[in-house]
């Protein structure tokens, strides 16, 4: 009688080397997190951090009761804020449309020169926050609504341009070829083959950006670009927390209404 040793292979998801690499990666990630945390908090005054809940409760108590008599003074700045968002969105969309057509592979006249320039404009616009744009423009053209409008417009170029050029690149080539097969020229192909396909996306992107700009324009006044942010900054500087609470509630209500209007318009268009 012979005895045969039977060995059964044990399946493992990863080899020992892969497991070692994964654990090494996790250890390195934790070490990086600890190092970053120490770097960010080396100048932190922890006494202020531990006292923060008490300070927050104190400010909350000073916000009550709300100063509702201050509300009529906010209607003008609120209207300015809505105008900043609306006019800035319109200006941004107007500038973003040609940039988007230059950035799209299927519509750009030059893939080696004009397309990289258009992509750079889109990236540059998206990389700089509207508050920074407003800060720069206030220094260049002075404080006021114009600086806020231009800041919103410059910020909107990248957002609208990126989404729109992606929509252009996703158009149905068969419809474009059908228009071209009729003997249509380049402008006619653009007008009848591409534009009808991207119009729902265009309106949806524009309305969505307007909704975002309503929110962003509420804080531009903090740097002198007009709108309700000017009132917010003034109330904070004078420690009028009851007025600050009214402004914050008004901003919240405005954003909620703009979100509702934006959703209704997008559903109606798309």
Image (cartoon, rainbow, N blue to C red):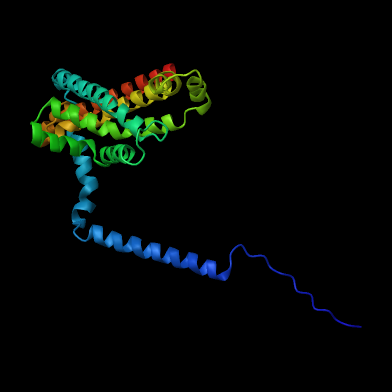
Give me the residue at 16% from left, 26% from top.
Answer: 227
Q: Position of residue 145 (x, y in %)?
A: 14, 25
Give me the residue at 32% from left, 39% from top.
Answer: 119
Residue 226 can be seen, yes or no: no
Residue 11: image quadrant is: bottom right
Residue 65: image quadrant is: top left
Q: Position of residue 171 (x, y in %)?
A: 47, 28
The N terminus lies in quadrant? bottom right
Q: Is residue 253 left or right of residue 185?
A: left
Give me the residue at 34% from left, 60% from top.
Answer: 33
Q: Does 34 sit above or below residue 210?
A: below
Q: Position of residue 122 (x, y in %)?
A: 30, 37
Q: Does 124 sit above or below residue 156?
A: below
Q: Which residue is more in the foreground, 1 or 91?
A: 91
Q: Position of residue 260 (x, y in %)?
A: 36, 21
Q: Residue furthest front?
A: 183
The C terminus lies in quadrant? top left
Q: Does 39 sit above or below residue 163?
A: below
Q: Is residue 7 left or right of residue 158?
A: right
Q: How many marks?
A: 0
């Amino acid at each position: 009688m012979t005895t045969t040793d039977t060995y059964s292979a044990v399946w493992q998801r990863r080899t020992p080397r892969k497991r070692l690499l994964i654990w090494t990666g996790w250890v390195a990630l934790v070490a990086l997190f600890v190092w970053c945390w120490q770097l960010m908090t080396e100048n932190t005054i922890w006494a202020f951090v531990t006292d923060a809940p008490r300070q927050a409760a104190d400010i909350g108590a000073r916000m009550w009761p709300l100063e509702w008599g201050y509300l009529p003074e906010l209607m003008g700045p609120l209207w300015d804020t809505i105008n900043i968002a609306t006019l800035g969105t319109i200006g941004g969309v107007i500038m973003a449309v040609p940039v988007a057509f230059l950035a799209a592979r299927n519509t750009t006249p030059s893939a080696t020169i004009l397309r990289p320039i258009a992509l750079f404009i889109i990236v540059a616009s998206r990389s700089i926050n509207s508050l920074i744009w407003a800060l720069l423009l206030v220094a260049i053209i002075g404080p006021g609504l114009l600086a806020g409008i231009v800041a919103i417009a410059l910020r909107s170029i990248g957002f609208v341009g990126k989404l729109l050029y992606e929509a252009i690149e996703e158009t149905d080539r068969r419809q474009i070829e059908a228009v071209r097969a009729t003997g249509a020229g380049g402008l006619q192909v653009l007008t009848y083959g591409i534009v009808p396909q991207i119009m729902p996306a265009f309106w949806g992107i524009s309305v969505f950006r307007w909704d975002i700009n309503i929110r962003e324009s509420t804080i531009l006044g903090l740097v002198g670009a007009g709108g309700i942010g000017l009132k917010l900054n003034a109330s904070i500087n004078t420690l009028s927390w009851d007025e600050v609470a009214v402004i914050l509630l008004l901003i919240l209500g405005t954003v909620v209404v703009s979100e509702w209007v934006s959703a209704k318009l997008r559903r109606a268009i798309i």
